[in-house]
Amino acid sequence: MYIGIGKKDITPQKPMTMMGYGDREHPSIGVHDPLFAYALYVENSDNLPFCWISVDVCIFGLDCASAIKKELSIKTGVNQKAIILQATHTHSGPDTFSIHTGTTVEEKEYYALLIEKISEAINEAKERKEKVTIEVREGKGSIGVNRRGLSKEVDDRLFLFTLLKTNNTPLATIMYYSCHLTTLGVENYLISADWLADVRNWGEKEYNIPFMFIQGAEGNVDPYTRGVLDMGDPDQAKGVSFEVMNTISNQLIGDLVETYKRAPLQLLTRAKLKRIEVTLPLRYGKLTQSQVEQKIDDWKQSFAQFLHIPKNEVAIDGSINEVIKKYIVKNKISAKEAAYYVAEQFAYTQFMWAYIDNKEHIDADLGTMTFPVSIVDLEKIALCAVPVEPLMTLNLVANKTIKEKNILFCGLSDGYVGYLPHSENYEEGDSPMLYETVSTIFASHAADELIEQVTKGLQLF
């Protein structure tokens, strides 16, 4: 197989609204470290060429990802359906959820920059492609914890894919790991790739080759500095200093050093892409349009009573998060009541993302949502790119279910429609008040159905 890799700087040139926390109060005020887009271009003689793109932003909406991929296809010649557009999920990057429809000068300029620079990265990767094999090493990352409970299981697997040229020298390294990029918190207004920045810089300086990151199933995994995600604590979104972030990065670098010392698990000689459509059941079941409107109205009425404002003043977007948190702090609301209303606003905003912003992807009459999943088959390993935040439980259960391959789910790919917990996560005693199971739009058995449909997809190779 032939593989090339390209890298381009996508750092915003002007202050921009940031994404990752719902209650930031103003745009970015500068840059701590640059953001990048990496493009991995793969050719096999018996498979359509494909490209995996890793971008230092929080998320792309479904329609935004589709619009970007369409433009990239025109500029690079890579089939739109053979492009995987994944966000690294930094919470200190620009708001790109619907950047393709942005109306401000800053949004329009940044969208144009994204298209230009990612296209350049793809074309660079195509031009530099070489015949390679891939060494796979597996280690353990030590910076992530299960934010649903520190005593609960965590997927600490860290995979390094080293691309080797025919002369046995490395072309690039790809790291797969499941962990939020959230050492920096809501109080940070400097653009940053978070803990990934120093890790990637180390890899590229140490080996003088590109070091690309593929985000895993990080839905319930945060850096240990964040600890448990407590919706009753209005300060839970606060982060650490850049100095502490550097300490976290150095700890993961130590994990990488140990992983590099290990003997390769296997040597891969092919990488093939299959794209399937999956249909998953929704949490709210079958809904008519009037029922959708009624649910939104009920939420707004509840928030209006809590905030003591008219119903028509209740925000119909993510800004409700900031309003509720400020009210909780100002009025010294109890942790129990605060947790309830914070949970409700997450359910409310996720519901509107699905049934209003992404309604063309939903069949409300059937109570289902359909979206694409890209599967990259690497012989004994399969990377499954999904437009959700999968909880790491999905990885662990999939590998118990699918014996013949090591399944690695890669979230935030080709769009975003919220969290996808596994049915096991609903068996956790406190799940009714835990963020991921509260905010998801999917039914409790949806992840099991995803594993089943991916298993069928793997049989297509």
Image (cartoon, rainbow, N blue to C red):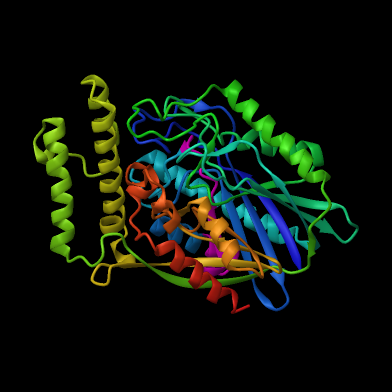
Question: Is 95 placed above or below 370 here?
Answer: above
Q: Looking at the rendering, which quadrant does residue 457 occupy?
A: bottom right
Q: Looking at the rendering, which quadrant does residue 265 occupy?
A: bottom right
Rendered residue at 38%/50% (across/down)? 98
Rendered residue at 46%/66% (across/down)? 450
Q: Is residue 389 left or right of residue 269?
A: left
Q: Is residue 349 left or right of residue 213?
A: left
Whole-percent x and y of residue 286?
23, 67
Residue in front for this viewpoint, 142 or 108: 142
Q: Is residue 102 left or right of residue 414?
A: left
Rendered residue at 10%/40% (across/down)? 311
Rendered residue at 56%/36% (across/down)? 193
Question: Is 86 placed above or below 110 here?
Answer: below
Residue in front for this viewpoint, 349 or 259: 259
Magenta span contains residue 76: yes
The magenta region covers: 72-93
Whole-percent x and y of residue 141?
66, 41
Q: Which quadrant, please, contains the C terminus?
A: bottom right
Q: Which quadrant, please, contains the N terminus?
A: bottom right
Q: Is residue 422 visible?
A: no
